[in-house]
Image (cartoon, coloured by chain):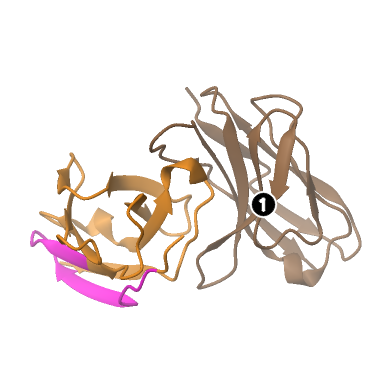
Amino acid sequence: NAGVTQTPKFQVLKTGQSMTLQCAQDMNHEYMSWYRQDPGMGLRLIHYSVGAGITDQGEVPNGYNVSRSTTEDFPLRLLSAAPSQTSVYFCASSSPGAPPEAFFGQGTRLTVV
Amino acid sequence: DAKTTQPPSMDCAEGRAANLPCNHSTISGNEYVYWYRQIHSQGPQYIIHGLKNNETNEMASLIITEDRKSSTLILPHATLRDTAVYYCIVRVAEAGNMLTFGGGTRLMVKP
């Protein structure tokens, strides 16, 4: 099993550009989520999904869109990149039940210039 | 999720036990204590979790006080590879992977 796979690993965008960060998991997990981590800080929740077709906002959703058309994939879209979105982005997945542990991808390091 | 308080940094000698404390005085009865660690900006890695009993696995032990207001993660024989930021998180089971990360404790294991 590959676990949680994020692509790309590194990306540089110009202000105003859009792009999609990809996240795929092969563990048949129902729960998936996106976090961002700014330098020296803990992770903050952007969006999450409890199953295909169901998404909701986390702590810092502005500037990001998500969709969940399949169990395996949970892409994160940046609509119009801003320098404030320079960060490391992590995707996580887990199963429902009490209590599930979360599996994280290795991250996408995004720089917006 | 209940708020947690951890020291920002700790040092430990290689081969000695590392004891990482966490305060969670507002924890509710149905909230679990989770520990994750993050090695050098990699994705966080699950370590252990518990509700009220002490727990042990191949990575660590978790000691939860009887009133559940604090806990300690114990790495019994720390190695250089255990140098990381350790996060204590309390949450209900239904929260899935919607985790609230604080600042964590930066553990430096020294030779």
Residues A38 and B91: in front is B91
Q: Quadrant of residue A14?
A: bottom right
User: Does residue A43 sit above or below B105 in this rendering?
Assistant: above
Q: Which chain did the renderer colour orange?
A: B
* Side of B96 where B61 appears, left or right: left
Extent of the magenta region: B4-20
- Chain given the colour brown: A
Instruction: Identify the residue at image location x=79%, y=44%.
Output: A20
> Front-most of B81 and B44?
B44
Q: Chain of mark 1?
A: A
Q: Identity of the amino acid at label 1?
A: Phe
Horizontally, residue B106 falls left or right of residue A81, namely left
Vertical comparison of A40 with B73: above or below: below
**Residue B102 visible in rendering:** yes
For the residue pair B54 and A34, the one nearer the viewer reads as B54
Residue B93 lies in quadrant:
top left
Q: Give x and y (percent) for residue B11.
A: 21, 74
Query: Which residue appears at 78% of the width and 62% of the height?
Result: A62
